[in-house]
Amino acid sequence: MPPLPVITGLGFITSIGNDRPTVLRSLRELRHGFESVEFFGNPDLPVKVAGTVKGFAFPTPNWRDWVWPDHFAVDRELLRGLAPHGVYALCALQQALADAGLDPAALAGGQTGLFCASAGSPFLLGHFLNQMYATRGERGNPMGIISSIAGTLNFNLAAHYKISGAVCGFVSACASSSHALGYAMDEIRLGRQQRMLVVGAEDMTAESIVSFSTLRALSNNPDPATASRPFDRRRDGFVGTGGAVALVVEDAALACRRGARVYAELVGWGQAGDGYSVATSHPEGAGLREAMRRTLADARVDAHEVSYVNAHATSTPAGDRSEALALQAVFTSNGAKPRVSSTKALTGHALSLAGAMEAAFCALAIAEGFIPGAAHLEEPDPVCAGLDFPRVSLCEAPHFVLNNSSGFGGSNVCHLLRRPA
Amino acid sequence: MESPVPSNSAKTYLATSQADRIKHLPAEARAAFQRFQTLGDPAGLDMVICAILADFMPRRPTVPLAERPGSTRLIDDLGFDSLAITEVIFFAEDLFGITITNEEMVHVRTLDDLRGFIRRKVAVHAPR
């Protein structure tokens, strides 16, 4: 039997909470993390809601002006190379390591790897390039590249924690951190690493979010209580958010030896492309359907055994429809009826961070014995017929949980989590 | 290659005042900079240089840099690395309106080296 990857530590910096108890309460009580915002100081922008990350502020590109909660330690030496989402990531990883009972000194030595995902920092990259334009290339922040390009998380965190195992960043848009988690599972299953740190993060800035309005992908609904409503007939786009989530994934044998708490076992994953469009999902969710099937096959689990699906659904008209059809093909048409919800109704869509964040929510649901409800869903789109959306969180302990993610270019990734024996 | 037209942010960078550039430095360093600008007071210049160094040091200084001996080495004693030194150079270039080449910086190893080097540079280029 290959090694079994298990989740032993979680850290959260999210719109619905900056620690595990707060996130748990938000998921159980369906408390959303949205606030009214005015991006770029422009009241005429139709996008007026975001999943804000409380307790942090990044008013300028200069780290000397940045604010984070006092109880997190952010070294000055590290700050100069960090983007806003790097600060989130550091705080989330500190939490996850403490949660897993790991001394950072234990991460050196080559047995621990680090896989990360973010889109980089458009906020800092824009500032860096504007400096260069202004000085015709004669000036630029020496840390401008390191702090702003995709990969900034793994550059910084690997050096800071002296990780000498596998280190990599993943870029597949909104499936990025799901890829990071999937390949982290493989590192353990193949016996290459005993422990993997998986970190997803995104800035929560106008530059990261409003850019999606050019694609007409964002909700123009100004009401924080209803702007994000996946699978609802009246959904009109996603609500952006940022933050960071860190997961500690270990070989079950190692976790057992050191007496670590196991949130969930990671028993399968799969991916498949749509082969269809650069930006929109396949109209029938072909790639996501195949990714779900491959995941179930990888875990040797039947669709009937799945208790809960944490859907990717971002609240866009086209994307939610595709996923609903894919879910029907995998489950409903086979007589299977798992509970389904998208926690993006509470958090907003966290882009590269989404997959890792929702995998962590699934692990919490398994460990705490509940199923997150489908918040803000009042009138399910008729295309969702046959899907079981609980309107409140349920006190049901799920056994197998499926986590879906999809990204630009039709990149679809799923994970299957199991309650520990 | 043709450069894009500078955006508003680029224009802002060009127009950044010296007061804005040093707003993160301690009040006494900002006052010393004023004295240096108006009176050409070299003691004021030394205080500004120490404040800039302290601001860019990777680790917060435990002893005020002005109290350190002039032979204190930037890399070996203060923990600077090449990136942090580059940050100091760019900042000093913008603040004092001087140009510092990589070749020149190779010879700057200690606090006294840096203070002497910048004094000579600004003597050539101003006081304003």
Image (tube, rainbow, N blue to C red):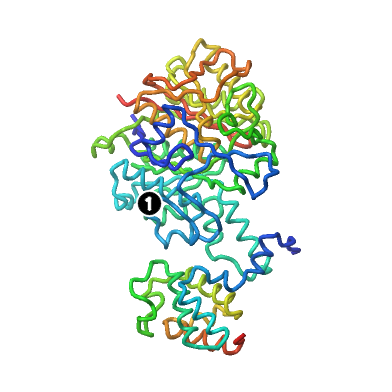
Residue at mark 1:
A72
Which image quarter is the N terminus of chain B in?
bottom right
| Image-quadrant location for residue A361 | top left
| Image-quadrant location for residue A18 | top left
Left or right: A14 in relation to A406: left
Q: Position of residue B116 (x, y in %)?
A: 48, 87
Number of callouts: 1
Instruction: Out of A170 and A32, give the one closest to the viewer.
Output: A32
| Image-quadrant location for residue A283 | top right
Which image quarter is the C terminus of chain B in?
bottom right
Q: Position of residue B100 (x, y in %)?
A: 57, 80
Instruction: Out of A140 and A346, give the one closest to the viewer.
Output: A346
Q: Position of residue B81 (x, y in %)?
A: 44, 70
Judging from the image, mark 1 belongs to the subunit labelled A
Instruction: Out of A15 and B108, give the one closest to the viewer.
Output: A15
User: Going 45% across and 14% down the picture, which residue do you hit?
Assistant: A304
User: Going 60% across and 61% down the picture, which residue do you hit?
Assistant: A128
Left or right: A406 in relation to A155: right
Instruction: Out of A36 and A382, give the one closest to the viewer.
Output: A36
Q: Amino acid at mark 1?
A: Phe
User: Going 39% across and 44% down the picture, which residue do you hit?
Assistant: A197
Label 1's element? loop
